[in-house]
Amino acid sequence: MLELEKLYNYLEYKYNEDLDYIDDIYLYLHINKLISENESEKDIVKQMELLDKGVYVKLKYEDIQINTLHDMLIKLNEDKNMLEESINNKLDKYNKNLEDLTDIHNNISNINEKEAQTENTDCSLELFNKKLEIWWKWISNDIIKKIVKYSNNNSKEEKYKINICKQIFKYFNLVNKIANIEEYSYKLIIYDVKNYGKKNLDTYPLDLLLNCCCYINTKLNKYYPEIFTNTEDIKSVLTDFNYVTNYLLIHENLYDIDDENDIIIFKVKDNIDLFNKLNSCYNIYKTIKIALKIQFDSTQNIVLTSNLTELFSVLYKLIHEFDKKINDKTIRNEIYKKLNINDSVKNKYYVYVKYLNNIIYQIFHYYFENVLKKNTSIHKCLEKKYTYLIDNNVKYTDKI
């Protein structure tokens, strides 16, 4: 039996470099955000205490910025890709590749992360540990011993295998660094969105914002299968800063950072179908609003493009479903209200968004007053959106 635990313990420790530095950069950037937003001294000191003495000043002189994380990501991904190609070329001799090893690692990690351990999980873990041992069959315990004890008396073939082993663990260290930087970037973005809305998002590179959207979308799809858009489709839709930030803002009711500083997804447990329809109604309305704003700002006119037509079609289908189910005269009057738009109307954009806002508001109003109970998960997840709709009623009336 291969002594893989000995190999992993030694080489993981040997190549576990720079992860503390990435932790420090995250804390430094988070502390600077708290300072710039005039947060309480107590909160700032609490975060400062997590850094070793002198680290904050050291990073300050290094001029660490959000772009530092972005630049590190680009460089690390380039290094990872080059190293991956080099390792696979060498492993080809043994009919092995890094992708298979990564899949085995991921499966073992996913099993270990499961909250409830069952007999099936134990069997699965045993299966993948066996697959791990089979993958490493191209080395021997003698090779492992030479790595751990550092032997100079090695044959050409042994040196070749030892070098590959070291490169593999260097590769996984790069993977860990990239994962850490990405997660810390998402935490910084999420903290900004949850506490300051759109205000600071233009300080982040668009790549980081888009990656954060994809990360959140993947987690949403995990908890709410068949409700949210496929992540690959998301990338084709989020084409600029406005749409990317809109995605982060309209979904902020479903994600947060908990007291343990972990990114979490809120789970709506009651009436998931109603939640999905109300949530989708609001999200589509907000996406239409962004599209109309971009168009009106550039042309001073409103034209129904194919993209807008598609969005309106989906939205009106939901609205008419609600209209039929609720059967309320107030909502129906809003839907079929005639819009008086002519050349004397200075801001046609606000006429359209006020019309849509009022319809969605009336639907939300009905459910918040008659159906949704306070302190339920669906009420908590939609309450902020309902408040926005109420505020917008006044705001848009003043704009016209």
Image (tube, grey):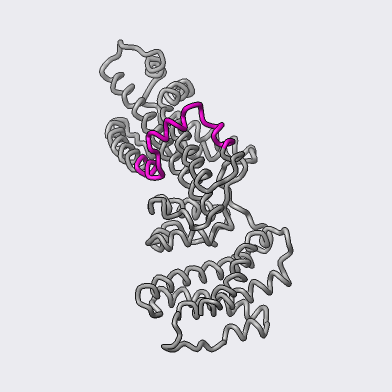
Quadrant in the rendering for residue 251? bottom right
Question: Residue shown at 40%/58% (left/top)?
Answer: 235
Please, what is the dominant secondary structure of the magenta stretch? Answer: helix
Q: Nearer the viewer, residue 374 or 110?
A: 374
Question: Residue shown at 60%/65% (left/top)?
Answer: 385
Q: Is residue 380 above or below residue 215?
A: below
Residue closest to the far top: 153
Left or right of 331? Residue 201 is: left
- Can residue 210 be seen? no
Q: Nearer the viewer, residue 318 or 195?
A: 195
Q: Is residue 134 above or below residue 141?
A: below
Image location (x, y in percent) of residue 37: 52, 48
Q: Is residue 54 above or below residue 253?
A: above
- Can residue 254 be seen? yes
Left or right of 85? Residue 259 is: right
Image location (x, y in percent) of residue 49: 56, 31
Image location (x, y in percent) of residue 7: 44, 22
Image location (x, y in percent) of residue 95: 32, 34
Question: Residue shown at 50%/37% (left/top)?
Answer: 27
Q: Is residue 54 magenta?
A: yes
Left or right of 323? Residue 105 is: left
Q: Is residue 50 magenta?
A: yes
Question: Residue shown at 44%/89% (left/top)?
Answer: 342
Start-end of magenta stretch: 45-72
